[in-house]
Amino acid sequence: MARASPGRSPPSGDPERQQRWGLLFDELDSNKDGRVDIHELRLGLARLGARTPDSDGQDILQEGDIDQDGGLTLEEFTRYLQEHERRLLLMFHSLDRNQDGHIDASEIQESFQALGVSISLQQAEKILHSMDRDGTMTIDWQEWRDHFLLQPLENMEDVLKFWKHSTVHASKNNQLNVLGGLRNMVQEGGIRSLWRGNGINVLKIAPESAIKFMAYEQIKWAIRGQQETLRVQERFVAGSLAGATAQTIIYPMEVLKTRLTLRRTGQYKGLLDCARQILEQEGPRAFYKGYLPNVLGIIPYAGIDLAVYETLKNRWLQQDSHHSADPGILVLLACGTISSTCGQIASYPLALVRTRMQAQASIEGAPQLTMLGLFRHILSREGVWGLYRGIAPNFMKVIPAVSISYVVYENMKQALGVTTR
């Protein structure tokens, strides 16, 4: 980390803040000479997404550059941030009208009205959305601080001006693409953060897939009776029941996976520590938080996925089996890709609500909205497309995973001598 000028040290204070400021300074100081000049500051602000038409770094440099040498040392930078955070805290408290430690859309609307500016609740929700990183529909002090840390704001009038200029573009700038999301995760927790929760995911997917496919074969056998083949709707019923059975049994592991994936660096020591903290702090019911939207979502997903997959595979066998009785890996992958895509489109809104319910449960003091409450909020704030936020990276993960699982499924059926029903 870059050092301050010889004989000078950063002002005393909270070690966590000092470390955070030091890391930020080190990131801005691209040439590692112990000073951040205007060029480095502007590049850093742009890289961090904090540069706006009204803030190109010049105001920060003018206020923080005590010795007027055209650059900021670590000491000058931390002194600036210390004073700036104090102002931000005062503004946060002025917005937090009920003093519960969180700012909601109605408080934003009331604060603007107090300044003589009338905005609708929908506009206030758009402003809130530009800062809300954890999906709780409120802003806590950390989110407020991090959002404005590198914006030279003096008072609420400056905040109003900032929002008036940037809110139009905020929704676009804050919709992380896949690469942006990966970059933020690496910055927050290193390369290992990309595999957060993967251990529990591996432990979860094995019994989940085994139970689902076993239940599917048994339910098909029960439905089939004396029939030679099953109709599409019967495969849908079998798939839905199989998916619901598997999810009900392994759902606590789903909750653990979500918590471990969304955790802050160092929050949990591991799987058992995560389970212990949830049990002690929230009770056993927390292990089934979001279960209802999950099981409602898995019914159409598993039903459509399994029914479409087997229907497509059987159609291929009927039309092209004279060339080969084995569909082959490419055909199975194609059938799995189409079936999982159909299932995802049908069930994704419920999966999104489930994940948000699990995420909000992990945040102390956050409002615990119900499934219907979350649906209404998403629809009012983001419209119908908000129910499909993140579906593109989800496709990138689910389609190859499901397709490969079907290839393994078919080969294991042949190896174990399970006949197709």
Image: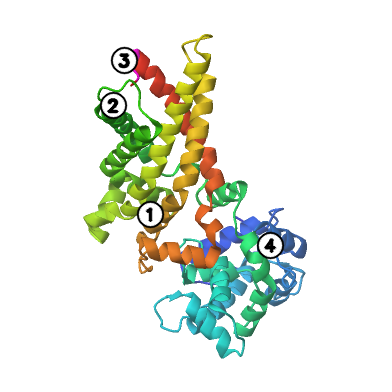
In the rendered image, the vertical position of residue 265 relative to residue 148, given as above or below = above
Question: Pointer 2: residues within 10 angstroms few (<14), some, or many (20+)?
Answer: some
Q: What amino acid is found at the position of numbered circle 3 in the picture?
A: Leu
Say left or right for 403 vs 3: left
Instruction: Kindly report the distance in space between the C-alpha atoms of the residues bearing marks 1 and 2.
Output: 50 Å
Residue marked by disc 2: 224
Are the residues flagged by discs 1 and 2 in contact, CB closer than 8 Å? no
Residue at (40% x, 17% y) in the render: 411
Comparing 160 with 298, the one in front is: 298
Say left or right for 181 vs 64: left
Comparing 275 with 405, the one in front is: 405
Pair 2/4: label in front: 2
Going from N to C along the chain, the mark reached first, 4 or 3, is: 4
Q: What amino acid is found at the position of numbered circle 2 in the picture?
A: Arg
Instruction: Kindly report the distance in space between the C-alpha atoms of the residues bearing marks 1 and 4.
Output: 28 Å
Residue at (76% x, 65% y) in the render: 38
Residue at (53% x, 77% y) in the render: 121
Secondary structure type for disc 3:
helix
Going from N to C along the chain, the mark reached first, 2 or 4, is: 4
At which x and y percent is residue 383?
Answer: 54, 62
| The stretch drawn in magenta includes residue 417 | yes
Instruction: Kindly report the distance in space between the C-alpha atoms of the residues bearing marks 4 and 3.
Output: 59 Å
Q: Which region is colored magenta?
A: 415-420
In the rendered image, the vertical position of residue 313 relative to residue 168, given as above or below = above
Residue marked by disc 4: 45
In the rendered image, the vertical position of residue 171 relative to residue 59, given as above or below = above
Give the total number of marks visible in the rendering. Answer: 4
Going from N to C along the chain, the mark reached first, 3 or 2, is: 2
